[in-house]
Image (tube, grey):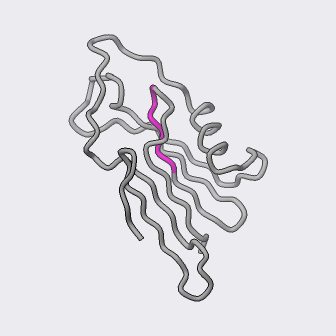
Amino acid sequence: LEFFSGGYEYDYEISAADGSVVKFKKEVDGTRPVQSSGNAAPAYIGEARAKEIAFGHAGLAAAAVVRCAVELDHHDGHAGNHGAGCCEYEIDFKSGGYEYEYTVDAVTGEILEFKQELDG
C-alpha cells in the first residue's frame, strides 16, 4: 500500500495471512521546498536529542532499545554548506523483534523518514 499525504510518502507492507503490518516506511515526498537559513550556520540538535525523537516516535523507552547506531549525514552537493535541511541524523536500532530506521533533520528535529520492519 502506498499513498501521499501532507508532503510525505507512506509505504505499508501488509500480511495477507493476518492483516498485520509487516513493514512501514514514511519519507518526505520530494516536492517540499528545502528551507534555507542564509549564510548563518545553524545549531544541530545533537545525537542524544535525535535518538530521543526517534525513540519517542517509535513509542520506546531508551532502555528497550538495542544495537543503536547514529550517523550525521551531509547531503550530496551541500559540502561545506550547513544551511537548514542539509544535514540529517540517520538512526538505526532494534527493539521487540523489530528493526527501526529513522532520518531526523539535524537542525529542526523533524522526522524526515522512518521505517519499521520485522527483525530477521
Name the residue located 66 percent from the left edge and 42 percent from the top edge: 56
Residue range in magenta is 102-107
Along the viewing direction, whichever of 86 and 109 lies nearer the viewer: 109
For the C terminus, the image quarter is: bottom right
Query: Residue placed farthest to the bottom in the image?
Result: 17
- The quarter holding residue 105 reads top left
Q: Is residue 54 above or below residue 26?
A: above
Query: Residue placed farthest to the right in the image?
Result: 63
Along the viewing direction, whichever of 4 and 41 lies nearer the viewer: 4
Name the residue located 47 percent from the left edge and 68 percent from the top edge: 12
Q: Residue 68 vs residue 8: left or right?
A: right
Say if the magenta span includes residue 106. yes
Q: Position of residue 80 (x, y in %)?
A: 27, 24
Name the residue located 53 percent from the left edge and 25 percent from the top edge: 45
Q: Position of residue 96 (x, y in %)?
A: 72, 64
Q: Position of residue 26 (x, y in %)?
A: 45, 54
Q: Is residue 68 above or below residue 98?
A: above
For the N terminus, the image quarter is: bottom left
Q: Residue 115 vs residue 64: left or right?
A: left
Name the residue located 48 percent from the left edge and 23 percent from the top edge: 44
Along the viewing direction, whichever of 4 and 114 lies nearer the viewer: 4
Query: Residue placed farthest to the left in the image?
Result: 77
Along the viewing direction, whichever of 80 and 17 lies nearer the viewer: 17
Q: Position of residue 31 (x, y in %)?
A: 25, 44
Query: Residue placed farthest to the front in the image?
Result: 5
Q: Residue 31 vs residue 14: left or right?
A: left
State whether the magenta stretch is mostly helix, strand or loop: strand
- The quarter holding residue 35 reads top left
Q: How many marks?
A: 0
